[in-house]
Amino acid sequence: MKLPNSPKALPLIQLIQGIARPFEYLEASAKECGDPFTMRSPGFPSTVVFSNPQAIQEIFTADLNQFDSGKGNKILQPLLGENSLIQLDGRSHQRQRKLLTPPFHGERMRTYGQIICDIAFQVMNEWTIGNPRPIHPSTQEISLRVILRAVFGIDQGERLDQLRQQLSTLLDSFNSPLSSSLLYFSFLQKDLGSWSPWGRFLRRRQQIDELLYAEIRERREQPDSSRNDILSLMMSARYEDGQSMTDIELRDELMTLLFGGHETTASSLAWAFYWIHHLPEVRDKLLQELEPLGWDSDPSEIAKLPYLTAVVCETLRIYPTVFFSLPRIVKSPIEVMGYQFEPGVMLSACIYLTHHREDLYPEPKRFKPERFLERQFSPYEYLPFGGGNRRCIGYAFALFEMKLVLATVLSRFQFALADNRPVKPVRRGITTTPSGGVPMVMIDKLQRASTPVPTLI
Ligand code: HEM
């Protein structure tokens, strides 16, 4: 089996480049080798990277038994555990997806609309006028509070406060390319005491686990059938054999949702604030669309606004916070784009390169929401949430949340970028985020900002 060309750099150099400057590495590799190309990294199987919509369609629509994926996500195991949806394959994956998907869609999702608006307002209302600070920590706080609320059904309490604090600190452990290397190089994963990076990570994880297990224990001891949050749903679910989820399974799935639903949305929101304020014409058009909204506007109506939707789509196109789909590991021989692949090879759709194809997105480096008003892209041309049977289960929720947060904040507060320094994508764990966290300054709290918001939290 001959794999597509690989960049000439040594596998270790490729891995370091991929960690330190992921987008530059991908662009340089595609330029050197074409599409597809093979990424080689020490400690990982060869991965063939595609950015051709036809190939991506073939991969995403292949028979379910054609690929595994969970086994290819080992770098997330220390964080999420081996029972995480992301680590599962086959029937157990399908079973968990069936359980976890509905709360993040349709009517169930819409019940969080007002809560999202309230949380966004409360977090941003803590800013003082004229004091520059990065907006990313605020979008992190919003998305963390939203996902905690969805998962646990509450937003207050000592345990939840501790959990919020501990989760932020744990995710901060991977806030630079250097610290992200911990996940990629298993030889760095040595517990040399609480001062060593891995030792610190393990201790923080332990503290989070204790909080999660305490919550699970309490709910088992005091069951309340009226609760409809995601943890209650998982606890009452029964597999076909009548078994319920074990404490470890519950812990791993909780971590998966908290981790998957938090950082991705927070970074995407920080990018959206950057682009909206970097380009006055985008901001003006958006404000015009938001102008007729009252503080009691229906969140579902806000989510349908066309220009707001286009701004969110373009934000997720230009710098997708997750730049690859999860790997698809070939289980039986398959041909994609004329290449024959044998079992064991990993295939992956490169979201970033697909989103930067000139033939699909002319002037791909320019932020132009209009492209999403002028044409519709297929799920193999535009794929910020991946696709097929591993498509992000939180995609509808994330889009809904982003639109509501932007609408709430822009119609209640006036912001500007604090400086003209260029903002670049930098790695944070397995995601990317805007460098410097997007320093902004609040210029004004608008009239409507003083209107009391209904407090549901
Ligand atoms: C802007 C926000 C988000 C982005 C860009 C994003 C992106 C992605 C991508 C690219 C994948 C891999 C899909 C594939 O391989 O085909 C994924 C998977 C996943 N995402 Fe998201 N995501 C976001 C928000 C969320 C939220 C809010 C949740 C939780 C509710 C979530 C939970 C997950 C889970 C559990 C998976 C694994 C699915 C599986 O293995 O079957 N994500 N996400």
Image: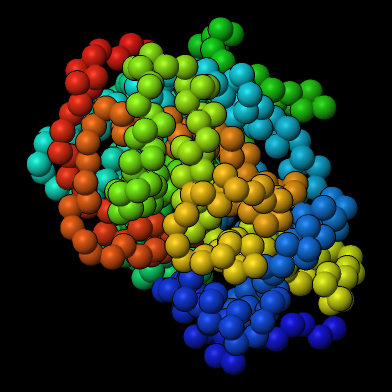
Q: Is residue 278 left or right of residue 361?
A: left
Viewer-side residue, 272 vs 113: 272
How many marks overall? 0
Viewer-side residue, 248 vs 323: 323
Please name the residue shown 54% across and 12% down the image: 227
Q: Residue 78: x, y in percent? A: 51, 55
Q: For residue 191, what is the image quadrant?
A: bottom left
In the rendered image, which quarter contains the N terminus? Answer: bottom right
| Camera sees residue 187 | no
| Camera sees residue 304 | yes
Q: Is residue 135 above or below residue 351?
A: above
In the rendered image, which quarter contains the C terminus? Answer: top left
Q: Is residue 455 above or below residue 409?
A: above
Q: Residue 386: x, y in percent? A: 65, 52
Q: For residue 32, what is the image quadrant?
A: bottom right
Please name the residue shown 61% across and 68% down the image: 357
Viewer-side residue, 377 vs 238: 377
Please name the residue shown 76% across and 36% down the image: 95
Q: Report the coloring of the rendering.
A: rainbow
Q: Residue 356: x, y in percent? A: 56, 66
Q: Is residue 290 left or right of residue 419?
A: right
Q: Is residue 454 left or right of residue 62?
A: left
Viewer-side residue, 109 vs 153: 109
Q: Is residue 219 above or below residue 340?
A: above
Please name the residue shown 47% across and 54% down the image: 368
Q: Residue 50: x, y in percent? A: 69, 69
